Amino acid sequence: MYEVDHADVYDLFYLGRGKDYAAEAAAMAELVRSRTPGAASLLDVACGTGTHLEHFVAQFAEAEGLELSADMLRHARSRIPDVRLHQEDMRDFRLGRTFDAVVSMFSSVGYLRTTAELDGTLRTFAAHLAPGGVVVVEPWWFPETFIEGWVSADVVRKDDRTVARVSHSVREGNATRLEEHFTVADSGLGIRHFSEVHLITLFHQGEYEKAFETAGLRVEYLEGGPSGRGLFVGVPA
């Protein structure tokens, strides 16, 4: 039996599902420049394996990434070895510089547990914002838009690897409890199964907006976004 973890199959799975990282990064760059014309620097917070960040590098003169997971960063460093990456917690980091844009995609802020953590995170983002810059955050579902009991199932294949994933989501307190099971089959290596449970907070729209405003940012909510959950866009008040 061989070992495999989420970071090992993350990119294969989401790319196999049709997630278009290049198009999402281009749309984000367009949004950033609609608020901050001439934006030249960007910080990708919770950059994961760097799949958006590798495209931000082509969009901005300076692009850096920040990620807490060592496993995710290992893959990111392999993908974009020349990009500066920081292993830090989004809730409280200090990089000693500012950026024209600070963005956090793929609902990563949902892993914050409380409104106090959300408020502190937005203050940290704002502290790293250059004058006239913009903060963009992709939220998780709101309590009223979350679908109780949601089941998802996908199978993706590439070369000699096949990944099957099933997930089930329920409400647990003020959070989504998302349980997912992966079965990974590799030619010559065999089959491995692993499972994970994620608690993703169902913040209200007003709680996101309050966090931006507390951080000194004027905020607007845009419908749609890369995953259908919308985007919060904040500029200095």
Image (cartoon, grey):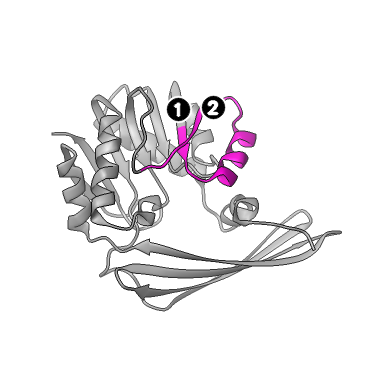
Q: Residue at x 34, y 43 (%)?
A: 91
From the viewer's side, name the closer residue of 83 and 17: 83
Kindly report the distance in space between the C-alpha atoms of the residues bearing marks 2 and 1: 7 Å
Q: Is residue 60 above or below residue 189?
A: above
Residue 122 sits inside the magenta stretch: no
Furthest residue in direction bottom, as rendered: 149
Task: Looking at the image, tell me whether mark 2 or mark 1 is earlier in sequence order.
Answer: 1
What's the amino acid at mark 2? Val
What's the amino acid at mark 1? Ala
Occupied quadrant, residue 35 = top left
Q: Residue at x 60, y 51 (%)?
A: 7
Q: Residue at x 41, y 42 (%)?
A: 89
Determine which of the numbered discs, if any, sits on residue 40 in the image: none
Furthest residue in direction right, as rendered: 188
From the viewer's side, name the closer residue of 162 and 195: 195
Estimate the x, y position of residue 106 in percent, counting from the top left: 42, 51
Residue 68 sits inside the magenta stretch: yes
Estimate the x, y position of residue 100 in percent, counting from the top left: 31, 26
Estimate the x, y position of residue 88 in percent, counting from the top left: 44, 38
Determine which of the numbered discs, if any, sits on residue 63 in the image: 1
Asked if residue 209 lies left or right of residue 146, the reply is left
Q: What is the magenta range? A: 65-90
- Categorize mark 2 by other alpha carbons within 10 Å: few (<14), some (14-19), many (20+): some
Furthest residue in direction left, as rendered: 237
| Residue under numbered circle 2 | 83
Q: Are marks 2 and 1 in contact (CB under 8 Å)?
A: yes
